[in-house]
Image: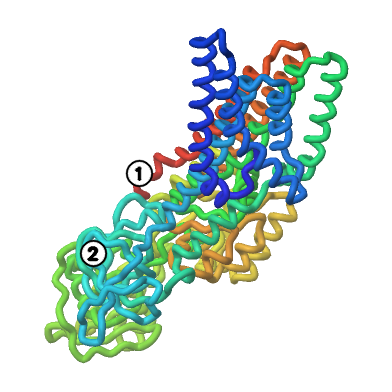
Amino acid sequence: MQVSSHANSAARSWPLMLATLAGTALVVNAFIAQWLYAANPLASEISAFLGALILAIPIFWTAIRDLWKGYVYMNELVAIAVLAAMASGDYKTAGVISFFMLIALLIETRSAAGAHQAIEQLIRMTPKTARRLNAVGEEEEVSVDTLQVGDRLRVRPGDQVPTDGVIRKGGTTLNEATITGESLPRDKTVGHDVFAGTQNLTGAIEIEITRVGNDTTLGHVRELILAAEQSKLPIMRIIDRYARYYTPVALMLAALVWFFTDDWNRVIALLIIACPCAFILATPTAMVAALSAAARLGVLVKNVQDLEAAGHIDMIVLDKTGTLTTGELGVTQLAPRPGIQSSDLLRWAASAERHSNHPAALALQRLASETGVAVQEPTEFREEAGQGVSTVVDGHTVLSGRATWLQTTGIDDKHLTHDYTERARGVSAIFIAVDGVYQGWIGLADQVRPESAESLEALTKLGIGRLAMVTGDRQSVAESVAHTIHCPEFKAECLPHEKVAFVEAAHQEGYRVVFVGDGVNDAPALAAGDMGIAMGAAGSDVAIHSATVALMNNDLRRIPFLIELSRAARLVIHQNIAIGGLFIMGGLVLTGLGLLAPIAAAIIHNAGSMIVVFNSARLIRQGEDLEEQPAG
């Protein structure tokens, strides 16, 4: 039996259940009446007729509706089989057959609707109302539909965030699993983005709306998931193409059986067993289950063909900054000159850079805060872009910046010259002088994601033959990161068009290439390969639309998960097709030999469908280990 759409599936589910219950009660009553009133079969026959009719009406209606639309699907086979049983006067058999076929239809409609609802629950998390703040800061409860960009909202502990925004007041912990797939809550404070559908766990916050309605991240997620469900694999299109020929062939086989055997029971059984519900369910149930598993972990696949293709890739090219690394500078080394304490070096540098917004300055502030080093208030702060800062801290003149800049100010120290020429490779360095005396240097580097090495190792174990990192950063930095994460191949100092050229060259060598980037400056490269995977797509329209797969968080372990899911889905599809084919071919042979009665054929038909549905449902549990283990 065919299910035309998720909406129809959900709408038809309850009427089907009621019809099944009512008709079944009458058919069961017919068997009881036959046993109790064997001498008067009329009551039994009337009950069986009414029960069979009630059970058969949904089947007839489905077949007529398909024919009215010009479609010839598998529903007509079942309708003819039930009609033949009723025409032969065997209403009990017709009722039992109708019961089992309705059960099959319910399995399909409920499994399709259930899988769809499992996805919808991930994305239908926004509340109907919101607490909007008026001009004087008072709350007013309004419909979410009336919200506009720029409005300010108050979100209390326990509330769902009604729309995308940025925190303007307060701090809290948010559960963002519906968007990013990360099970651990995240701390948020002023300036951090929040997304519709996430749950506020602890503090009260005030947010300023940045997106509303379908423009929110959750809205984009919904559109992508529903579009993916509606897309089809090549094998599904082949089935659709030849489905119109299947029913006439099955009817011709039934006619031949009747012609040579003159046995209506064989004809009815053949029509029932020929309905390839299990075969039709083989691919859609597996793909919907796989899409559900992916969406649960924040992996958005735009087209099921992309999900299928992920299992065939043999080369992955990864951008460095923002993909393999966090994109934020962190202190990697404190190198004071002899006689100077590391804490003093950090105190002078962090105090001098206190009013700077340079990423290096922010990294110094973070480290000082984490280690408890007291940062003092500087005076006479002066920053020279691209060079360094000059300040007065506790009455001392402090310089923090490039070695060449310190030298231009008159600081000439052999330790400075030595450190400048021999400093550690793969880091950026700032040099510090106090009252004209060189104090030492501090190394900073982009922080490697803790799961990067683990993810690349997992990809290697999955048989990905070639892993490469491309970056616009310096050769020494690229070499250091590649060594840290055990990436066998890298290319440094790449401009965006050179990244594209690298991917295209690998593609021409015969590799099926996936490019992984942040989805913004890597958009051309994302489009150049067989697939593009955008990292950290939550809140980024560019990232969501520039790649074929969007990761709503920055956990690189989602990439090997995607490949494993693709391969598991393909295996399940092949298993389902084999199961469906086995039940059909075996059933046809048994029917032709007269070894399969109509009721037994209906039972076997249901068994095949149920096995396929339950086999596909196993895919929903894929990736459960990632939900339990945070990155790093």
Q: Tell me where residue 314 sits by quadrant.
A: top right
> Is residue 34 rendered to the left or right of residue 189?
right
Residue sitting at x 71%, y 27%: 81
- Residue nearer the viewer, 95 or 530: 95
N-term mark: 2 or 1: 2
Q: Callout 1: few (<14), some (14-19), or many (20+) C-alpha neighbours within 10 Å? A: few
> Is residue 434 rendered to the left or right of residue 99?
left
- Residue nearer the viewer, 311 or 129: 129
Q: Residue 224: x and y, percent?
A: 55, 59
Q: Residue 377: x and y, percent?
A: 16, 82
Q: Quadrant of the N terminus?
A: top right
How much space separates mark 2 and mark 1, taking CA atoms?
22 Å
Residue sitting at x 66%, y 62%: 528
Q: Residue 330: x and y, percent?
A: 33, 65
| Numbered tag placed on residue 172 in the rendering | 2
Where 550 sits versus 408, above or below? above
Q: Residue 539: x and y, percent?
A: 44, 67
Which element is circle 2 on? strand
> Is residue 326 rendered to the left or right of residue 439?
right
- Residue nearer the viewer, 56 or 617: 56
Number of dots carrying numbers: 2
| Numbered tag placed on residue 300 in the rendering | none
Q: Do the residues bearing badges 2 and 1 touch, measured as CB atoms within 8 Å? A: no
Amino acid type for the residue under numbered disc 1: Gln
Which element is circle 1 on? loop
Amino acid type for the residue under numbered disc 2: Thr
Q: Which residue is mark 1?
A: 629
Residue sitting at x 61%, y 26%: 49
Where 253 sits versus 232, above or below? above
